[in-house]
Amino acid sequence: QVQLVESGGGLVQAGGSLRLSCAASQRPYSSHVMNWFRQAPGKEREFVAAIRWGSGRTYYADSVKGRFDISKDSALSTVYLQMNSLRPEDTAVYYCGRGRNLGENDHWGQGTQVTVSS
């Protein structure tokens, strides 16, 4: 059973930046997709960004396109989410996960809180 551990969350002012990390206990296969989701209080969990482990192709929700950047370090089996120009509406618990399909996770991390103050 793969373990996924997120880190890097915290409190930041609007306009600031944070980098989230998601370390996998087992190296993903080239067929895997690593997906980031987020869930704000009182809202449903929503897709944020994804990267295909094999090709490195990336995908973003419209709400974060141009501000967030997803990347991976294959040697460390780690996925990163660089978040720039943060807004109060980005406040949420951010979850990473691994799956076979874009936007679908079979395994989830425990989540990391991101709070953006205005």
Image: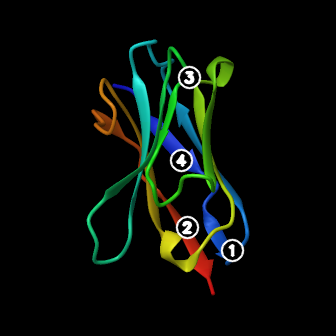
Which of the two discs, 3 and 2, labels the residue nearer the N terminus?
3
Which residue is under mark 1? 12
How far apart marks 4 and 3 lie (CA) works out to 20 Å
Disc 1 marks which amino acid?
Val
Which residue is under mark 2? 114
How far apart marks 2 and 1 lie (CA) works out to 8 Å
- Answer yes or no: is residue 91 visible: no
Which residue is under mark 3? 56
Disc 4 + disc 1, Cβ < 8 Å: no
Q: Which mark is residue 67?
A: none
Q: Nearer the viewer, mark 4 or mark 2?
A: 2
Which residue is under mark 4? 6
Q: Residues within 10 Å of mark 4 (few under 14, many from 20)?
A: many
Q: Nearer the viewer, mark 1 or mark 3?
A: 3
How far apart marks 3 and 2 lie (CA) works out to 25 Å
- Answer yes or no: is residue 89 visible: yes
Which of the two discs, 4 and 3, labels the residue nearer the N terminus?
4
Q: Residue at x 50, y 14 (%)?
A: 54
